[in-house]
Image (cartoon, rainbow, N blue to C red):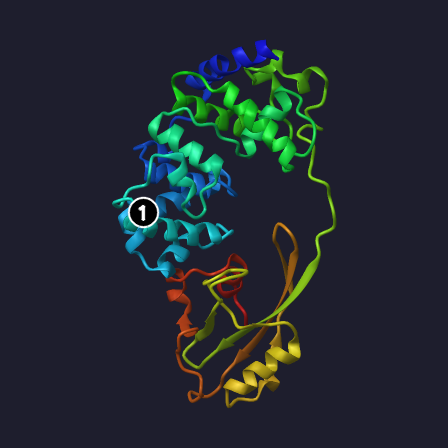
């Protein structure tokens, strides 16, 4: 293994000089804020999807003080569609902490970075290496897959024992110089060559030292997560429209699924949904239209969404804007953070 370790970084750097990704938007210019934002976006999102979101985000909020000053609704609206919205809320909270405790800049120490919400060891390592060129290892999904294959690491990488082994290995592999380039190369090789499915082993600079390739195990390493069927939950959402063609939105609680996003009034079943409507409006929900249900997948379960369309015929009703309820026109929806399935539902013709 010692020979494979000594050759790892030099080969990776040579490969990246010729074949790596050099025109990603967060690389020009490369600043701690832009690296941090891109790393948070890329935690659960591919580069091809994250790029447009990144460009819109930095156009609206170009630096950390701008992010800290922005209302959470604006941050969530810019994030809307990327999913895993805790990432956006943590970004906002971390920016405000930086203003309060770090003179408005992102800290350049591992311990200080780890104290900020949403920043774990791998993200902190990426910020330090990419933005400051210091020796800090990373262990994102691409790095885990690459290391598990090259060094034939057994076991699901999500377990603490395997992760500990991978961290120790990633420390040993760090070169003495060009840390930013090395870190980017590690990400790039995993994302573009050593992919989850159909890795392009013929283009890999580590092919002759890769144990998984030698053993014909690139399809079985890394060891997959133990599978189990995803549970399914039900949600009945009220699509309430008034005579002005506005739709009633309700802000989600500050914790839990879609925390703080604006969504549709949601109840566990049809009867409770119609009762919620009757409690708040003069109109009878007899004309409610049950739209086609659809599924939305999360990492741990599937949500079966049952939309109920109710059009209020009159102009008078008891429901007015309040802290958690708001009437909105379709053209004004982009200014709010909406869950992806709700945004899609409201953009489609419903009548």
Q: Nearer the viewer, residue 348 or 342?
A: 342
349 or 260: nearer the eye? 260
Quarter occupied by the C terminus:
bottom right
Q: Residue furthest left?
A: 103
Other-residue count near label 1 (Cα within 10 Å), few / some / many at <14 / 14–19 / ≥20? many
Looking at the image, residue 98 lies above or below residue 139: below
Q: Residue 105's quadrant in the figure? A: top left
> What x and y, as percent, mark residue 224?
69, 35
Name which residue lies at 54% across and 61% down: 256
Q: Quadrant of residue 215?
A: top right
Instruction: Tell me: 168 left or right of 108.
Output: right
Helix or strand or loop: what does disc 1 sit on? helix
- Which residue occupies 40% across, 37% down? 111
Q: Which percent across, then down, holds residue 221? A: 68, 28
Res. 86 in view: yes
Q: Is residue 194 left or right of residue 51?
A: right
**Where, by quadrant of the figure, is residue 37 drawn?**
top left
Residue 345 appears at what percent x and percent y?
Answer: 53, 63
- Residue lying at the far front of the rendered structure: 111
From the image, tell me which residue sits under label 1.
98
Spot the residue most to the top. Answer: 3
In this rendering, position of residue 249 left or right of residue 298 = left
Residue lying at 69% horizontally and 59% vertically, measured from the top left: 232
Q: Is residue 285 left or right of residue 79?
A: right
């Amino acid at each position: 293994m010692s020979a494979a370790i000594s050759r790892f970084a030099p080969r990776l750097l040579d490969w990246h000089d010729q074949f790596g990704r050099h025109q990603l938007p967060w690389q020009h210019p490369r600043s701690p804020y832009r690296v941090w934002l891109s790393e948070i976006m890329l935690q659960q999102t591919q580069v091809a999807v994250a790029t447009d979101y990144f460009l819109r985000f930095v156009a609206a909020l170009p630096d950390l003080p701008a992010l800290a000053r922005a209302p959470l609704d604006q941050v969530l609206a810019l994030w809307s569609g990327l999913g895993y919205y805790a990432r956006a809320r943590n970004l906002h909270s971390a920016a405000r902490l930086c203003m309060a405790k770090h003179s408005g800049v992102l800290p350049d120490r591992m311990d200080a970075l780890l104290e900020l919400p949403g920043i774990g060891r791998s993200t902190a390592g990426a910020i330090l290496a990419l933005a400051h060129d210091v020796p800090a290892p990373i262990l994102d999904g691409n790095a885990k897959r690459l290391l598990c294959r090259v060094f034939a690491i057994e076991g699901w990488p999500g377990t603490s024992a395997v992760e500990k082994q991978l961290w120790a290995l990633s420390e040993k592999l760090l070169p003495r110089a060009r840390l930013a380039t090395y870190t980017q190369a590690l990400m790039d090789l995993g994302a573009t060559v050593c992919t989850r499915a159909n890795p392009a082993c013929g283009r890999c600079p580590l092919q002759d030292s890769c144990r998984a390739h030698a053993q014909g195990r690139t399809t079985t390493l890394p060891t997959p997560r133990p599978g189990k069927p995803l549970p399914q939950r039900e949600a009945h959402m009220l699509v309430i429209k008034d005579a002005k063609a506005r739709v009633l939105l309700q802000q989600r609680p500050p914790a839990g699924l879609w925390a703080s996003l604006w969504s549709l009034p949601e109840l566990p079943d049809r009867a409770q949904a119609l009762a919620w409507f009757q409690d708040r409006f003069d109109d009878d929900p007899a004309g409610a239209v049950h739209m086609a249900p659809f599924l939305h997948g999360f990492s741990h379960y599937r949500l079966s969404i049952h939309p109920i369309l109710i059009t209020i015929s009159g102009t008078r009703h008891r429901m007015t804007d309040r802290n958690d309820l708001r009437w909105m026109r379709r053209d004004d929806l982009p200014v709010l953070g909406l869950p992806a399935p709700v945004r899609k539902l409201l953009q489609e013709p419903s009548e």
